[in-house]
Amino acid sequence: MAAPAAPKEALVRVEDLTIAYGRKLVQRGLSFEIRRGEVLVIMGGSGCGKSSLLRHLIGLQRPAAGRIRYGEEDINDEDPQQQARLRRGFGVSFQAGALWSSMTVGENVMLPLELIGGLGTAEREQKAREKLALVGLADQFDTEPAALSGGMRKRAAIARALALEPPLLYLDEPSAGLDPLSAARLDELMLALRDAQGATLVLVTHELPSIFAVADRALFLDAERKTMTALDAPERLLQEGPPEVREFLRRGAPVEQAATA
Ligand SMILES: Nc1ncnc2c1ncn2[C@@H]1O[C@H](COP(=O)(O)OP(=O)(O)OP(=O)(O)O)[C@@H](O)[C@H]1O
């Protein structure tokens, strides 16, 4: 019998997090970890707080209560240098995937490298070309963003998030609005980043096929109960999860799995 796999190291620990806007409670009691080398999906109905959780994870919003720790350090640590260092450890691609329209695709990808300084133009360009090749856009370095398709634009935004080679990537709705083929290509890219680059990915998505295709684990934020009601592999959640999670997933499960769930 094979030895049991060693437990994966926790990169991030969310401890009893409460998300609120003023007096409006969005989620409470969120406790989970992000493990090195996994694809973790944040799912739940519209307005349950997925994007808000993402913004908390990257330190853009402060918790109403609870903590988010990277190793021993709190992302909301007061020391700006400490915060800047922690933020260098992850890349972010937000819903809009916005690229600067006044720059070429290559210049967009080089931007984070320029902001941190320390590299010459040739090195920056080489790194940007590497990242664009990784997302299948090797020949688009000099293209204006406006000339790319929606799927290509999203991949370019991911290349930019990869520019600093972060071990952890946060992606908000990476495949929203894409045709099925482009969405499937993006799923493949995310798995390749995990498997070939050893990246850890945390994504918010509504796309159920994508959840089954890429997630090692998925967590469910319940809008009514205002807390997390499940965290497990999507296939297991489909079979054994709480009723509302099974219902949520059944709509997007591969046919053979939905039939037996
Ligand atoms: N800046 C804000 N001020 C006040 N309320 C907010 C703010 N941002 C979000 N909310 C509210 O918090 C709740 C969660 O919003 P959030 O965008 O995080 O949900 P979501 O699950 O990502 O939604 P969707 O799936 O529709 O994108 C919603 O009720 C929303 O109206």
Image (cartoon, rainbow, N blue to C red):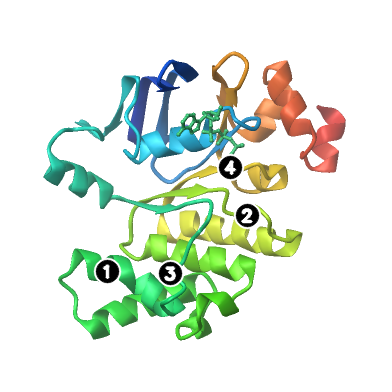
How far apart marks 1 and 4 lie (CA) works out to 29 Å
Q: Earlier in the sequence, mark 2 or mark 1?
A: 1
Which mark is in front, 4 or 3? 3
Image quarter (top left, top right, bottom left or bottom right) of the N terminus: top right
Q: Earlier in the sequence, mark 2 or mark 3?
A: 3
The answer to whether residue 236 is above or below residue 164 is above
How far apart marks 2 and 1 lie (CA) works out to 25 Å
Query: Relative to 92, is 148 on the left or the right?
Result: right
Q: Which residue sits at x=34%, y=52%?
A: 167
Query: Which disc is residue 113 wearing?
Result: 1
Q: Is the CB–ligand 1 distance for label 1 below 8 Å?
A: no
The answer to whether residue 125 is above or below residue 112 is below
Q: Secondary structure at mark 2?
A: loop
Q: Earlier in the sequence, mark 1 or mark 4?
A: 1
Q: Position of residue 13 (x, y in %)?
A: 34, 29
Type of amino acid at the residue the image marks with label 1: Leu
Q: Secondary structure at mark 1?
A: helix
Q: Secondary structure at mark 3?
A: loop
Q: Residues within 10 Å of mark 1 (few under 14, many from 20)?
A: many
Type of amino acid at the residue the image marks with label 3: Trp
Type of amino acid at the residue the image marks with label 4: Ala
Q: Earlier in the sequence, mark 4 or mark 3?
A: 3
Q: What residue does disc 2 label?
A: 175
Q: Position of residue 232 (x, y in %)?
A: 57, 28
Q: How many marks?
A: 4
Q: Residues within 10 Å of mark 2 (few under 14, many from 20)?
A: many
How far apart marks 2 and 3 lie (CA) works out to 20 Å
Query: Which disc is residue 100 wearing?
Result: 3
Residues 125 and 250: in front is 125
Q: What residue does disc 4 label?
A: 215
